[in-house]
Image (cartoon, rainbow, N blue to C red):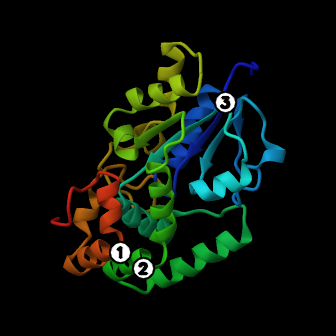
Amino acid sequence: MTSGEPTVFHITHWKSGSQWVRAVFKQIAPERLVHTKPDMSNVSDDQLRPGSIYSAVYMPTHWFDQQVSSHDGHRFIVVIRDLRDTAVSWNFSIKHSHGKVDDKRGDDLINDYRRRFQEMSVQDGLALVIEERMDPMAHIQLSWQNTSREHRLLLRYEDLITDEHAAFHSMFDFAGISADDAERKRAVDAESFSKRSGRSRGQEDVSSHHRKGISGDWENHFDERLKGLFKERFGQALIETGYESDLDW
C-alpha cells in the first residue's frame, strides 16, 4: 500500500452483493482490505487506516458522518439493489442458507426469523420482511442516493450482474487499484456466480447462499397483497432510486 492510495468505503445494504464485492476486493487488493466488523465499530476516526478499503459497510450517511468526521481524500462506492428483490433474497437466505455470524445478537435474530419463516407461506414471510426488515435498507439507499458529497460512485447490483467485468473495473479505477487487465479479469472470474455456485445465473438452489443470482425475481413471488403493501411503504423509494417511474407496476 502506498501513501497515494485513497481510503475507500464500499457502502451497501444487506442482500446487495456485499460479500461478492468484498471477495473481489480481497482477490485484487488483499493488503488494502479491512474486515469490517458486524457492528461497524471499526469504521471510526480512531481506527481508520489511510489507503485501506472498507468493504460491506452497512451505514446511512448520518451514522457514517457521526463515526467519520472528515471526508478529505475518502471515496465512496455505493451499491444498491431493487428493494423488492432485496426482500425476496433476505427471506430465502434467512429461511434456508444463511450461516452463523460473528455476533450473538445477529445469530439470535437470524434464528428467530428462520423459525418464523418456516411456519409461514412464502407470501406471509415476505409480508413480514416488508413490514419489519426493509426500513434500514431503504434508509441506507436513500441517504446515499440523495447525498451531494464528492467522490461517490453509485452502482446497482443489477449493473454487476449485467456486466460484472465492466462494473468491477469501474470500482477498481475509482478505488485507485493499479492492477492490469489480466489481474482484474482473474479477480472477477474467481468470484463469479458460476465459480461460486457451480450453476449458471437463474438456476435456483434454495439451499445455497448463492440462490439464483438474477434481477426481477420479485415478480415470481409478489401477489397483489404484497404489491400493495410494498407500494404503500416503499413505493416512493423505488421511484427515487430509479427502479420505477411511478406506482403503476
Q: 72 left or right of 235? A: right
Task: Tell me if 114 is positioned left or right of 202 in this view.
Answer: right
* Residue with the mark numbered 2: 131
Could you tell me the amino acid type at mark 3?
Gly
Badge count: 3
Residue drawn 34% across and 32% down?
163
Tags 3 and 1 touching, CB below 8 Å: no
Q: Which residue is mark 1?
A: 233
Task: Identify the mark at residue 73; answer none if there is no mark.
Answer: 3
Q: Position of residue 179 (x, y in %)?
A: 57, 16
Q: Quadrant of the N terminus?
A: top right
In which quadrant of the rendered view does residue 118 lie?
bottom left
Give how far apart the Cα atoms at labels 3 and 1 are: 36 Å
Earlier in the chain: of badge 2 and badge 3, it is 3
Tell me if residue 195 can be seen.
Answer: yes
Task: Judge left or right: residue 159 versus residue 110.
Answer: left
Q: Residues within 10 Å of mark 3 (few under 14, many from 20)?
A: some
Tell me whether circle 2 and circle 1 mark residues in contact (CB < 8 Å). yes
- Tag nearer the camera, 2 or 1: 1
Task: Give the foreground label among 2 and 3.
Answer: 3
The image quadrant that residue 106 belongs to is bottom right
For label 2, the SS is helix
Helix or strand or loop: what does disc 1 sit on? helix
Of 1 and 31, which appears nearest the observer? 1
Specify the amino acid type for callout 2.
Glu
